[in-house]
Amino acid sequence: MKTLILYYSRTGITRKVAETIQEKMKCDLEEIIDLKNRKGPLGFIVSGKDSVMKKLTEIKQIQKNPSDYDLVILGTPVWASTMSCAMRTCLRQYRDKFRNIAFFCTTGGTGITNTFNHMEQECGKKPLATMGLKASLVKKGRFMEEVSQFIRKISGS
């Protein structure tokens, strides 16, 4: 199954998970780039507020065409119990190009289920698999078993 991982990462935690999945699956990877500056403490606050309000943002056009892939794995941090603005924008722009999808997210606290529900609503498709990870475990490198289980679910084995 030809697979693309599309992810957004403000701090690098979601990127670490995306790169780990890519390494294990030997698939394509592309980062969603938010053109709004979301760095630092102020960026954190603004990002949470924008997310709660379900705002879209301006993102850099992705280079890979999702319709060329059998599966697109979508990864986002959890912001205020929902997906990042960049992921919401990506889903709005490209959802008609997704054949099959899977989701993963990283969180400092809660909101995993809510985030996946919002992503599914935005895509209009049910994911083949989902994986929610605590940021603290990702930072310590303690998430490999979860990634292996996620990949098995996707593969149907």
Image (tube, helix red, strand yellow):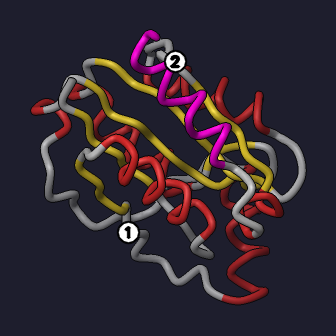
The secondary structure that most of the magenta stretch takes on is helix
N-terminal of the pair, mark 2 or mark 1, is 1
Residue 156 lies in the magenta-colored region: yes
Give the spatial CA distance, label 2 vs label 1.
28 Å
The disc labelled 1 sits on which kind of residue?
Ile
Q: Is residue 65 above or below residue 72?
A: below
Residue at the spot 55% in from the left edge and 56% down from the top edge: 17
Question: CB under 8 Å between callouts 2 and 1?
Answer: no
| Span of residues in magenta | 144-157
User: 111 or 43, which is in the foreground?
Assistant: 111
For the point 44% across and 21% down, the residue is 154
Circle nearer the viewer, 2 or 1 = 2
Residue 153 is marked as: 2
Tell me which residue sits at (64%, 34%) in the image.
131
138 relative position to 84: left or right? right
Residue furthest out toward the right: 109
Q: Would you name the residue on which mark 1 appears?
A: 33
Q: Nearer the viewer, residue 116 or 91?
A: 116
User: Magenta stretch: residue 147 in it?
Assistant: yes
Quarter holding residue 155: top left
Residue 108 image offset from top left, x and y in percent: 84, 59
